[in-house]
Amino acid sequence: MCAKERSQVADIDRSLYDFTKSEEGSERLDAGLTPEIVREISARKNEPEWMLEHRLKSLEIYHQLPVPDWGPSIEGLDMDNIVTYVKPPTEQKSDWESVPEDIKDTFERLGIPEAERAYLAGVGAQYDSELVYHNIQESVSELGVVYSGIEEALEDPKWEAIIREHFMKLITPDDHKFAALHGAVWSGGSFVYVPAGVKMDFPLQSYFRLNAKGAGQFEHTLIIVEEGADLHFIEGCSAPKYNVANLHAGAVELFVRKGAKLRYSTIENWSKNMYNLNTKRAVVEDDGVIEWVSGSFGSHVGYLYPMSILNGAHSTCEFTGITFSGAGQNLDTGCKVVLNAPYTSAHVDTKGISKGGGIQTFRSSVLVTEKAEYSNVAVACASLMLDDESRSDTIPAMDVRAEHVNVGHEASIGRIGDDMMFYLMSRGISEAEASTMIVNGFADPVSKELPLEYAVEMNNLIKLEMEGAIG
Amino acid sequence: MADALLAVQGLSASAGEKAILHGIDLEVNKGEIHVLMGPNGAGKSTLGHVLMGNPAFTVTGGSIKLDGADITEDDVDKRSKAGLFISFQAPVEVPGVPLNSFLRAIVAQHEELDLKGKKYKKRVAEIMAQLDMDEAYLNRELNVGFSGGEKKKVEMLQLLLLQPKLAILDETDSGLDVDALNVVSKAMAAYREECDGTILIITHNTRILEHLPVDRTHVMVKGKLVAEGDASLITKIDAEGFEQFGHVEETEVLRSEDDPFGGFNVEDVLADAEAALREADAKRASESGEANEAGAAE
């Protein structure tokens, strides 16, 4: 029945994501990376001393680590030109009316306040480097659920202690160069704490909008789902297109305690001048569940491999992903899973689409440690190339060190069959519509996992990408 | 006849370098039932595909007119909108596209049907009852994992939904499956009754024609129409086979789930390959006759 509604979605307006707002009133720090800039960011946030130390230490590590050489080229990214901090001309608000007109209009065009009214338990909206809006339904906060900016939470000693305990402990600054960069200049993002036993009926959503030209966005998302609790968190991102490089190097750290369940859904639609070098990681304890739903559509270059560490017995990970790589895009996506306890299971199902000379690579690594006896792993990746100039690769790796483990791997790379096109067209469907139908069908297992509104958005994005794909 | 619904004149077509159809002349009047018969590999299915505009084939001569309009150069979807329909021998599977969405999409392309909202639902339910199909099929992915008989039902459902001016029914193998045969017979009867449908049925099995008031029978051998007659020709073929129309080589029918065209294409490809091999053999033979280095390199 959903399918019916989805097929009735109105034509997409290209201006939906690609509009810019004046930066008037915003404060930009100088471009480049120096200890002075890092100190300046820290000072503006009035944060604890340990955080400043963490930043400076991260900056040192950043300078020591090499640029990754195993994926798509990021030569076009010159850190000396990236402005790491742009403060929008407002403080964080909890009602949309107080948000400045330009910014409010941005989020309204992206449908955020509407979604909040319709089906969200809480919303965070970040504009460039800072949150401009954060709100959580009273009924939810009464259950003890915390959903706020990290900076805001750090002001409360209780949460400061918890944040200090978890912050960049899963993703440490020496993980890779851009994790270090993140550690040095991170700003904004969300802190979510769901107390034991609290099962949230409605999702929380954070939306990240990067409006400033030549800037970077480095939000940090830290989520703790306590024992037996249940949360669905949605993350959306977009930016207008500029002719200079923008950078996104966020970090997402997820802690899923015993018997807890976290679903983390993302629809990423950065503009095609964006370098998306994002890091996401979850650790899951006994009987816990992490579910990733990940849609990557935008960016010029993307490196994205959400990682799940199944650390408790009977914990599970489900990863459903789709990547759409069009002209001028090189998206390297996949996931990493570590099964580190008995009776764990991981199920990975990804789809990749490339067209117009786009390059799409599925890269994964699964490690089953000695401890993970009686575990199950299934990895499936399917790629669809829409023309001869596009490329799809799969680079899966699996390292199984335990006994009694079930391992399955399936990979397929294909093209839209002429026979399929002929069949659909013989019923009166145009060439463009037929190929969109085939691609949507291919993506269907992913859109099924998304909330309806996001499935609609994803189908719209596919439709948008498919325009001009033919001929 | 000037006002034939389908008027094919001197139609020749090839797949790549290989010529398959040679100067086909064919006229079908509104409301008639024509049968196209012929041995395996004669080019019958190819003719169906060329009429529908399959870009896998190139028209090298002649013309196709539907209801007076020349459609020889038209794209496939335009031919459908003009009222042409083909039911496939082996319909393709389209993963992730529910049958219901697909049917809605094709109905939307044929505005003259005026099947929106409730009207669409009602009509689909009606046809599914006619074809003895469970409505649960609507939620299944188009043809994915369907049996041969189920796929046939989906084809016939589309036929009755679209009510084309001319239906080409590629039933080359339907005689092999009694259920499929019954479905097609039932659908043809309904199509004729509801909109005075015109049918060109491609087959080399005569059982499917038993209760059908056939107007004309055409026989194709090696890409040419070699005989034409009324329904009595079917009886004759049944008794004497195609040999009477000249020497017929029996080619094995290859069936494969992966083959979109249900055998005929595979035969063509195979024939291509065989021809290429023969040519290569002949060339090698002539070269070794000249006793040059090519022979020594071997």
Image: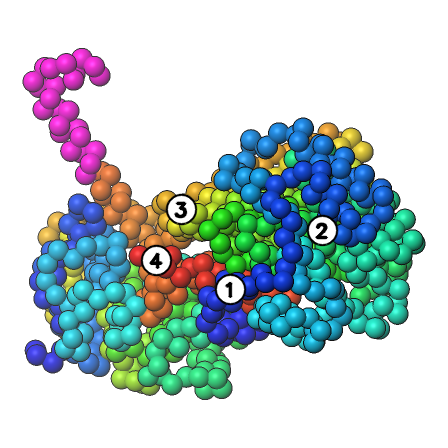
Identify the mark nearer the N-term, 2 or 4: 2
* Dominant SS in magenta: helix
Report the front residue among A338 and A377: A338
Name the residue tied to disc 3. Answer: A357
Let me know if marks 4 and 3 both belong to one chain: yes
Can the viewer see residue A97? yes
- Residue A127 forms part of the magenta stretch: no
Boundaries of the magenta span = B275-298
Instruction: Give the chain of mark 4.
Output: A
Q: Are marks 4 and 3 in contact (CB under 8 Å)?
A: no
Q: Position of residue A85 (x, y in %)?
A: 66, 50
Name the residue tied to disc 4. Answer: A470
Instruction: Give the chain of mark 2.
Output: A
Q: Which residue is painted at 13% across and 24% down in the image? A: B285
Q: Nearer the viewer, mark 1 or mark 4?
A: 1
Q: Which residue is painted at 17% across and 46% down in the image? A: B18
Q: Amino acid at mark 1?
A: Phe
Q: Are marks 1 and 4 in contact (CB under 8 Å)?
A: no
Report the front residue among A435 and A410: A435
Local secondary structure at mark 2: loop
Local secondary structure at mark 1: loop
Q: Nearer the viewer, mark 4 or mark 3?
A: 3
Local packing at callout 3 (Cα closer than 10 Å; few below 14, some 14-19, many 20+) is some
